[in-house]
Image (spheres, rainbow, N blue to C red):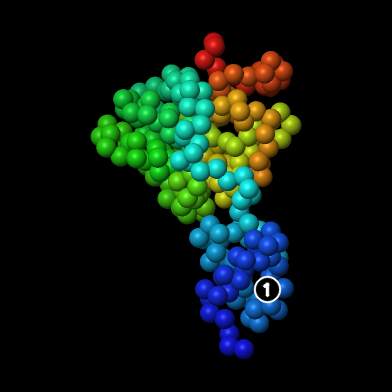
Amino acid sequence: MEPLQPFERHKYILNALESDGFVNVNKLSEDLKVTKVTVRSDLENLELRGMLVKTRGGAVLPEDRNAVRYFQNTIKEHAQLKEAIAKEASAIVRVGNTVILDSGSTTAIIARRLKHLQLTIITNSFPVIQEFSTVEHTELIVSGGVMRRPDFSLVGGLSRTVFNEIRADILFLGANGFCLKYGITCANIMEGQTKREMIKSAKLVCLVADSTKTGKVALVHVCDWDVIDVLITDTIDPDYRKELTDRGIQILTPQQ
């Protein structure tokens, strides 16, 4: 049997991941008839492309494929709720602020409301980049990284490095779900890693999420509530409001 070419090994590894959700370096070495060094090199290559996340002894899929949401769909969903959240969010931004805008449909709508202000915007979101690309009074900093196509975002090591280097006044953080017990979650491991770097870079961390995400838990834990300063949402259950305000988190809703 002729040795498999790199692209053939990569295809085998990705098929195994799709089937089992996890691959082991030792087993791949046996199956592919290559050294463990070669397998690890293949895994590193695929991780750089955002196809998997390396773990101790192997690799896993970077996200729950069943939970993947596409920007072109989410931007249309609950549009009025997101507009109300964007209005609340934009009201706390001041001229001259440095603002991190996370990926997601709600943050893209916030971007539209900030275009008239003189700001420094730092983002990993292509829709946000598009909003500010012709706004000459805005300083726009793009994180770089691996493109995650479902939400048109940049994630991975390069993106995390950029956020680690900067300091911002405000972060508007998106999420797939939030609940009292498990905190804030998203669907992709690399996305979650990037969000955590954003959080560390901001003085004020604002979670922006509509009420349909209340009580939902996605695959990846982003953070606990102790790093969230403000929750901006359209409406909130009284029990959630009391619990979060008791923890020192400010709640902003259109009803206030």
Element type where label 1 sits in the image: helix
Q: Amino acid at mark 1?
A: Leu
Q: Position of residue 36 (x, y in %)?
A: 66, 76
In the picture of the structure, the residue carrying the numbered disc 1 is: 28
Residue at horizontal 53%, vertical 66%? 45
Residue at horizontal 64%, vertical 61%? 18
Image quadrant assignment for residue 181: top right
Q: Quadrant of the C terminus?
A: top right
Viewer-closest of 15 and 28? 15
* Any part of residue 110 in sight: yes
Residue at horizontal 51%, vertical 23%? 81
Viewer-closest of 198 and 183? 183
Q: Residue furthest bottom?
A: 1
When the figure is inspected, residue 183 is found, relative to residue 189, above or below; the finding is above
Relative side of 19 to 97, left or right: right
Q: Position of residue 174 (x, y in %)?
A: 54, 35
Q: Position of residue 236 (x, y in %)?
A: 63, 19
When the figure is inspected, residue 215 is found, relative to residue 165, above or below; the finding is above
Q: Residue furthest top?
A: 256
Q: Position of residue 51 (x, y in %)?
A: 56, 59
